[in-house]
Image (cartoon, helix red, strand yellow):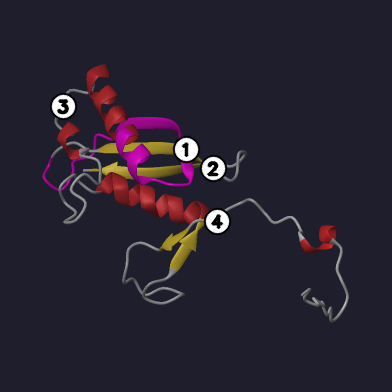
Amino acid sequence: MAANLTTTINGNIVAGYLVDSPKSTKKQIIGFNYPLGSVSRGGYFSKKSGIELVKNSVKQLLLTEKGQRVMLPNFGCSLRQYLFQPLDELTFEGIRKEIQTSFANYIIGARLVKISVFPTGDAGPAGGNSLQVVLSLKLDSDQFNIFDVEVNIS
């Protein structure tokens, strides 16, 4: 006994090349604006993306000492340990390795182009030295725009 199979089509059949339209392959990374809780436009937990997100994340990474975050004990760069070291190639190499390792582990969406470290000679809060760290970064989604992030370690 053969079954009668019928198909009913309502509407118009659209050609395949019209249905599958190409979509953008760029992925935008969105995160919290730091510091959290600051009263700003966008509310208590405002969001950022692009260069502002990366700048805030890098500043937070560089100014956080390892072991300072409760659930992420390896987050941060222990740059304050270099304040009283002699400013020679060995010290600058240690700073560079510390920044590169932490950057590779915790920063998403940007590449490190150049690291510059300058002794500022200003006395910090404890009367010691201070360093200025300048990172030149490039977003993964934008190959032509290079921007700097400056942080003072004292």
Tell me if mark 1 has few (under 14), some (14-19) or many (20+) residues whose alpha carbon lies within 10 angstroms of its own: some
Which residue is disc 4 drawn over? 28
Tags 3 and 1 in contact by the CB under 8 Å rule? Answer: no
Q: CA distance from mark 3 to mark 1?
A: 28 Å
The tag earlier along the polypeptide, 2 or 1, is 1
- Camera-side mark, 4 or 3: 4
Which residue is disc 2 drawn over? 140
Can you say whether 49 is above or below 119 in the image?
below
- Camera-side mark, 4 or 1: 4
Q: CA distance from mark 2 to mark 3?
A: 34 Å
Q: Check disc 3 and give the amino acid type.
A: Gln
Tell me if mark 3 has few (under 14), some (14-19) or many (20+) residues whose alpha carbon lies within 10 angstroms of its own: few
Q: CA distance from mark 4 to mark 1?
A: 15 Å
Q: For the magenta stretch, what is the residue range?
A: 101-127
Q: Which mark is residue 69?
A: none
Tell me if mark 2 has few (under 14), some (14-19) or many (20+) residues whose alpha carbon lies within 10 angstroms of its own: some
- Residue in the image at 83% along x and 80% along y: 8
* Residue 119 position in % (x across, y down): 28, 31
Which residue is disc 1 drawn over? 111
Q: Check disc 4 and give the amino acid type.
A: Gln
Which residue is disc 3 drawn over? 85
Q: Classify mark 1: helix, strand or loop.
A: strand
The tag earlier along the polypeptide, 4 or 2, is 4
Q: CA distance from mark 4 to mark 2?
A: 10 Å
Tags 4 and 3 in contact by the CB under 8 Å rule? Answer: no
* Residue 49 position in % (x across, y down): 50, 59
- Locate the N terminus and report the quarter of the image it occupies: bottom right
Query: Would residue 73 be counted in the magenta stretch?
Result: no
